[in-house]
Amino acid sequence: MELADKAVGFLLTAISISIFVYYTFWVIILPFVEKDHFVHEYFLPQEYAILLPVFAGVALLSFLCVFVGFVMIKSNNKKKSA
Amino acid sequence: MIILRNALHIFKRSNIPLYDTRCSGLWMGPYGLTSLVHDLVLKKSKSMAFPSPVALDHLMPFLLIIPSNCFEFNMKHILKILALLVVVAATWITLLETSVVPHHYTWLLPVYLIVSLGCYGLLMVGVGLMLFPTCPQEAVLLQKDIVEAKEFLGRRGVDVGSD
């Protein structure tokens, strides 16, 4: 039981730290590196640095709205039938 | 000397409590001083009365920044968050105006801050999950208690059949 919880927790921390490091590198450090360095191959073009978080945020918001609407409809149905 | 004597006379005449049990009492010194200055400067013309301590208490949450445990928790919390937001916005705008860093940097900064805030939240959740304390002995004891209670209530005729 606890092992599954600890594994999920460890996965979450690993994901969050990796996202933070990658994003910091992308936004802050990469503009100061000259264009011929090999590191640039590992990172997408800089426009995606804005598009990806915005896209993720919009997806999260829409998922929340859909979920809330779904739960409301289900409770309405239950109230109508009961 | 005359001014001092008059000041003391005014201070004694007004009903400013010298000791206030609430922690807003530490403002009574400046309050007394400002009411004194008010009386002296305006030559005691009662066209605009100095606000009484009771009225000031409603203004206090907007004036006090030092932490105190006298006021409502909600007001202090919201004010702290708002102040933090205002400070961040001000630094961002000054960065934009004075162009200390290249311009495309400063435009990316709010997005970066939001993403890092989300990352921090996720990190806290993950760390909390990892460090969550489970008590295996208590779990066993709890199961025993449940069995005992079910048996006891079953004997008294209460319906406990929900497994």
Image (cartoon, coloured by chain):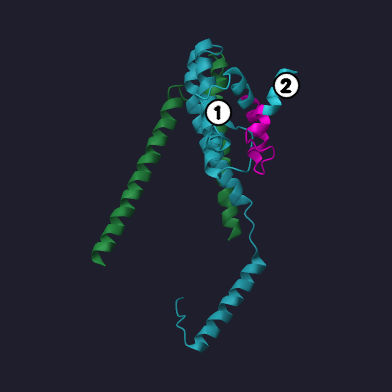
Chain (cyan): B
Image quadrant in which you'd find residue A74: bottom left
User: Looking at the picture, how far across and down is residue B10, in whole percent?
Assistant: 65, 27
Find disc 1 in the rendering and name its residue: B50
Mark 1 Cα within 10 Å, few/some/many (few <14, many 20+)?
some
Q: Nearer the viewer, residue B26 or B155?
A: B26
Dividing the image into 4 quarters, which one contains the N terminus of chain B? top right
Q: What's the magenta region?
A: B10-34
User: Looking at the picture, how far across and down is residue B111, in whole percent?
Assistant: 47, 27
User: Looking at the picture, how far across and down is residue B98, in whole percent?
Assistant: 53, 10
Q: Is residue B85 visible?
A: yes
Amino acid on which the number 2 mark rests in the picture: Leu
Chain (green): A
Q: Is residue B29 visible?
A: no
Tell me what residue is drawn at x 72 percent, y 23 percent: B5
Q: Nearer the viewer, residue B69 or A19?
A: B69
User: Looking at the picture, how far across and down is residue B37, in whole percent?
Assistant: 63, 21
Residue B52 is one of the magenta-drawn residues: no
Tell me, for residue B4, which label it has, or none.
2
Amino acid on which the number 1 mark rests in the picture: Phe
Residue B17 is one of the magenta-drawn residues: yes
